[in-house]
Amino acid sequence: MAGVAHPGRCHAGTGCCTGRTGSYHQILRGRARYQPASLASRRELEQVVRGQDTPLLHGWRKPLAGERVQAFLNGETELAGSPNGLQLRSNS
C-alpha cells in the first residue's frame, strides 16, 4: 500500500480538521504502552494542526506524541500500510 500524503496544517474556521484527527490518532498508535486518546485529545490534535501551542508539545507527551504529529504535518513522515496495520515511516 502506498503511503498517505501528509495533510498539512489547517486554519480555524475552515473545518479541515474535522476528518483528520483519526489519522493523527493512527500516528499515536505506535506507542503500545499508551492508548492514543490518553496521549492527546481530539481538541489538542486540532490545536497542533492549526499551529497553536498545546500541552501536547511540552513535557512528557512531547517526545511520545507531539514530535510525531509535527513530523507528519511537516511531511517528514507518512502513514503506510504494513502487515501490522498503519505505521509511520520516514519520507527520507
Image (tube, grey):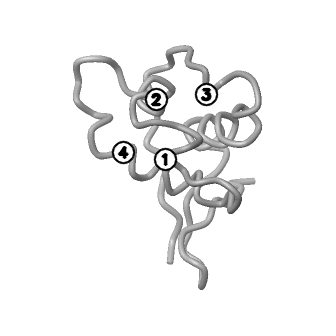
**Vertical comparison of 81 with 58: above or below:** below
Callout 1–callout 2 Cβ contact below 8 Å: yes
Q: Amino acid at mark 3?
A: Leu
**Alpha carbon of mark 4 to alpha carbon of mark 2: how far?**
9 Å
Mark 2 Cα shell of 10 Å, populated few (<14), some (14-19), many (≥20):
many
Query: In the drawing, does residue 3 fall left or right of residue 11?
Result: right
Circle 2 sits in a helix, a strand or a loop, which is it? helix
Q: Residue 44 in the image: x percent, y percent? A: 47, 28
Whether pointer 3 and pointer 2 mark residues with C-beta atoms closer than 8 Å, the reply is no
Residue bearing mark 2:
49
Task: Give the mark nearest the N terminus, 3 or 4.
Answer: 4
Q: Quadrant of residue 61?
A: top right
Residue 33, relative to residue 17: is it above or below?
below
Label whose residue precedes the other's in the sequence (1 or 2): 1
Q: Are marks 4 and 1 in contact (CB under 8 Å)?
A: yes
> Residue 20 has which mark?
4
Determine whether 66 is above or below 89 in the image: above
**Discs 3/4, front:** 3
Out of 15 and 91, give the one closest to the viewer: 15
> Callout 3 environment at 10 Å: few (<14), some (14 to 19), or many (20+)?
many
Pick the residue in front: 51 or 65.
65
x, y (%) of residue 7? 43, 43
- Residue holding disc 3: 56
Amino acid type indicated by mark 1: Tyr
Q: Seen in the image, is 62 located left or right of residue 17?
A: right
Numbered mark located on residue 24 in the image: 1
Give the mark nearest the N terminus, 4 or 2: 4
- Which three-letter amino acid code belongs to the residue tagged 2? Val
Q: Circle 1 — which element?
A: helix
